[in-house]
Image (cartoon, rainbow, N blue to C red):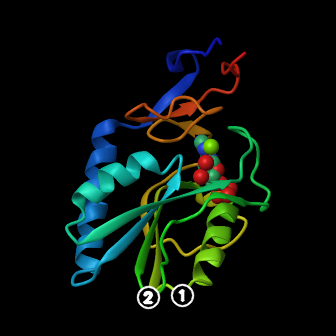
Amino acid sequence: MAVQHWQDFIKKELVSEEKLQARIKELGEEITRDFAGKELLVISILRGGVMITADLIRHIDLPLAVEFMAVASYEQGMRQSDGDVRITLDLRTPIKGRHVLIVEDIIDSGHTLKSVLELLQTRNPASLTICTLLDKFERREVDVDIRYSGFKIENEFVFGYGLDVDEYYRNLPFIGTVDLEKYEPPS
Ligand code: IMP
Ligand code: MG
């Protein structure tokens, strides 16, 4: 299978590794202060949320457990999310009475997170809080209450640091924007 190198389609580096790490450290410290005296259940949304989750929890100085959930909204990298969201991997543990922090890579239309929130709310957590690395605020179609946001970004397709284009490029330590004229899907 032929997969393009990211250098062949990157428009620009949007957030450098240094900026990502500095901001995630700030978020971790803020969460530590806000939840002082409590225990956290961090729910990482697969697969994009993996990078920020791994870095963020190293800066949260609280007793915490980590769980994973997978949701399918975009069938392929760039297709629009239509509000029809499926849970493809559910939690192993009950969240009743626990302080839950949902960690996501990006909030775009908001449909994915809204469905996740509605589902988790029915399980009666003590609290439900959202942390997203990126907020594509101009694209919002449904309201979601985001407590922690790393960076607000313009309406451009981004990749790297957990975010994929057709499932590739999640491993890059920075975030770049895609030049759609140059990008070719894997053949
Ligand atoms: P929403 O339901 O429209 O908010 O979609 C959120 C999901 O769409 C994220 O978890 C990502 O998987 C995906 N997504 C949205 N925008 C981008 C992007 O610019 N790059 C890569 N994935 C994206
Ligand atoms: Mg995706």
Q: Quadrant of residue 181?
A: top right
Give how far across and how far down residue 118 sits, in percent.
65, 77
Residue at the image point whose x is 31% and y is 50% from the top: 55
* Left/right of residue 2 with respect to residue 65 in the rendered view: right
Mark 2 → mark 1, Cα distance in angstroms: 6 Å
Q: Let me know if residue 139 appears in the view.
A: no
Density class for disc 1 (Cα within 10 Å; few <14, some 14-19, many ≥20) is: some
* Left/right of residue 109 with respect to residue 22 in the rendered view: right
Q: Is 10 placed above or below 58 here?
A: above
Count of numbered labels shown in the rendering:
2
Give how far across and how far down residue 186 sits, in percent.
68, 19
Residue for badge 1? 124
Residue for badge 2? 97
Quadrant where the N terminus lies?
top right
The kind of secondary structure element at disc 2 is: loop
In front of the other: 128 or 22 = 128
Q: Residue furthest front?
A: 92
Q: Let me know if residue 38 appears in the view.
A: yes
Quadrant where the C terminus lies?
top right
Residue at the image point whose x is 43% and y is 88% from the top: 97
Residue type, label 2: Gly
Residue type, label 1: Asn
Give how far across and how far down residue 37 sits, in percent.
21, 84
First-in-chain label (2 vs 1):
2
* Left/right of residue 58 with respect to residue 148 in the rendered view: left
The residue carrying mark 1 has its beta carbon less than 8 Å from ligand 1: no
Residues at marks 2 and 1 touching, judged by CB atoms closer than 8 Å:
yes
Residue at the image point whose x is 37% and y is 34% from the top: 173
